[in-house]
Amino acid sequence: MTQESDQTIDRLMAMEPAAVMAGVRSGEISRRDLGKLFGALGMTTALGTLLGEEPARAQSNELTMVIWEGYADPSFAAKFEEENDATINATPMSSSDDAFGRLQAGGGSNFDLVSASNDVSQRLIDAGLVQPIAPSRLTNYDDLYEQFQMPEYITKDGELYGANFAWGPTLMLYNTEEVTEEPTSWRALLDEQYAGKISTWNAPIQIAQYALLLDPTPEDPYVLDEEQLAQVRDLLVQQRPLIRTYWNLGDELKQLYASGEVIISDAWPYVGLGLKEQGVPVAEVIPEEGVTGWSDSWMITSGAQNVDLAYKWMDYMIGPDGQMGVLNNNGYAITNRTVIEGLEPELREALLMDNIEEGYDSILMWRNVPNYDQWLAIWQEVTAG
């Protein structure tokens, strides 16, 4: 909770209850601030009743979402909340499988939005967990580069299911004081000299990253035959005793670097950016084999309770404030042409946005894996060993 939120709660607590309710009726006290007060008192379930609303509408200004870390950071989300008298309730996900499982458990009605990556978006569509959207309701839609308006991973039968807002690579990250020679290959994550201080993301989609080490290199790292999968499994088994831990959340990986437990890993730009801000000596590198990566879209769940507010959030996130928020907070590439063209050339080049089509195509973007059950079984077998 921010200092400003604390001050708001203290001010309302010092008032007589009748004065608080009078302030709400006159508009001097917002619904959002009243929600903060009731939350501090542990009385959120009583809020709708006191306002004379039906229980189903008690949380009408709460926007719930399951997201990758940083996608609802207060540095940019607070403005949206203030402008829309809304409260964002964001649940971080550790992987696309985690997000799919959460939505499936609630039948698509336990969240309003999901920040889906392109390895899971079609699964969500096919499972009926998300709903088609109307681009006409997004005022910033026409500012997106054309390739992000109707990409195949968020379309089905000519209908659009999401708003593409961010993309980027999974890079190699290392501590420059502990790893003195810049690594050039993903094989560094299997190097015995770093034994006990290596980490890799705990997600089956990472099999594609390690498939890049096969000889010959697969034509498509997301379409692997039985022999190729067996070879990747052997690599992962070889790596297993060298691993300090498999990381799930970016903030977890930051802590591992800050404590010195990990000195080399794969990571998203978000992690390196945060560590540099903390003064941890790290650097990123694109290995010679290439990198895998993601393209993320906001998708409205099939049972969303706050569809209108969800549209406003999607529009905000593909607009200037949301795009700059993701850029500054996560260090990810964005999709709005107008915003990108206003950036410094050096920044555009660093994030592969100086030539969007070429930069995007240089990343082996995640995709729906046809034999994903096999990937999942291999990953669980190796990481549990």
Image (spheres, helix red, strand yellow):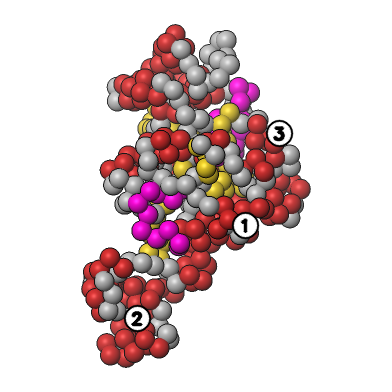
Which of 12 and 82 lies nearest the eye of the viewer? 82
Sequence-wise first label, 3 or 1: 1
Residue located at (52% from left, 67% from top): 79
Q: Which stretch did the figure color magenta?
A: 280-309
Q: Tell me the element at label 1.
A: loop
Q: Is residue 193 visible?
A: no
**Where is 204 relative to 89, above or below?**
above
Give me the residue at 45% from left, 25% from top.
369
Q: Which residue is mark 1?
A: 140
For marks 3 and 1, give the CA distance.
23 Å
How far apart are the alpha carbons under marks 2 and 1? 38 Å
Q: Amino acid at mark 2?
A: Asp
Q: Is residue 138 left or right of residue 344?
A: left
Q: Nearer the viewer, residue 249 or 132?
A: 132
Question: Residue 271 in the image: x percent, y percent?
Answer: 51, 44
Q: Amino acid at mark 1?
A: Asn
Check the image and report above or below for 306 versus 238: below
Q: Would you identify the image quadrant in which residue 17 lies?
A: bottom left
